[in-house]
Image (cartoon, helix red, strand yellow):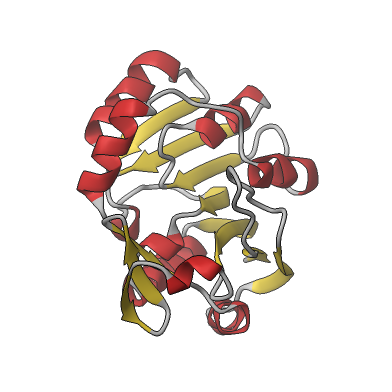
Amino acid sequence: MDKTYWENYYKEHNRPAAPSLFAEAILKEYVSPGFRLVELGCGNGRDSVFFAQNGVIVCGVDQVDAEVKFLNDTYAHDQLGFVAGDFTRLDLGGAFDCVYSRFTLHSVSEEDELRVLEWAYHHLNDGGLFCIEVRSANDPKLQDGERVSKNENIVDGHYRRYVDLSAFTQKLTALSFELVSAEECVGFAPYGDEDPPVIRVVVKK
């Protein structure tokens, strides 16, 4: 993961903004007050704070120590806390009702991705949900910057790996997850004048 890139980014964007469209959709369809949720790569906490405001018990994890300290000092309470760490090598105890990953798995290698998928399966309660939003291999941005491999590039110093929906769902079901929903669509994550196709997957243990 590009730790230095994100350290610099969150110096300028340290406060939570409006929640993502994905968080709003997950809260509406799948997550209820009292659920125990862990967010992998919570960044400035926008979605973690949003879930906690709606009665969810949240642990946000991010690699940027300074941002995690800021979030704990500013926003933490008895149902919301933040942990500094690499989400591909987590050492968190307990089990969760939901593992939430938005725009994080495409920032790590395929090997690290598999480690995260396995971790999620073993740390979800029975019936727990793994909710994922990730960049698609059909994203035009794959053609930009320095091409690293067929589905990886570096743009403005930032690594991305673009995901094939069919192959990704096969990985999840091979780990014994039950597929709940899988979509690839524009309109999921518009940003400025960009609105690329984005993948959303929800699976159940």
Coordinates of residue 3 in the picture (x, y in percent): 23, 48
Looking at the image, the residue that sits furthest to the right is 29
Residue 52 visible (yes or no): yes
Residue at the image point whose x is 52% and y is 32% from the top: 46
Location of residue 21 with respect to 155 vertically, above or below: above
Residue 31 visible (yes or no): no
Residue at the image point whose x is 66% and y is 47% from the top: 22
Quarter of the image containing the N terminus? Answer: bottom left
Location of residue 20 with respect to 159 vertically, above or below: above
Residue 136 as seen in the image, left or right of residue 64: right
Coordinates of residue 118 in the picture (x, y in percent): 43, 70
Nearer to the camera, 180 or 23: 23
Quarter of the image containing the C terminus? Answer: bottom right
Residue at the image point whose x is 30% and y is 55% from the top: 156
Quarter residue 133 falls in: bottom right
Residue 143 as seen in the image, left or right of residue 47: left
Residue 148 as seen in the image, left or right of residue 15: left
Nearer to the camera, 179 or 34: 179
Coordinates of residue 95 in the picture (x, y in percent): 49, 50
Coordinates of residue 86 in the picture (x, y in percent): 28, 51
Nearer to the camera, 184 or 101: 184
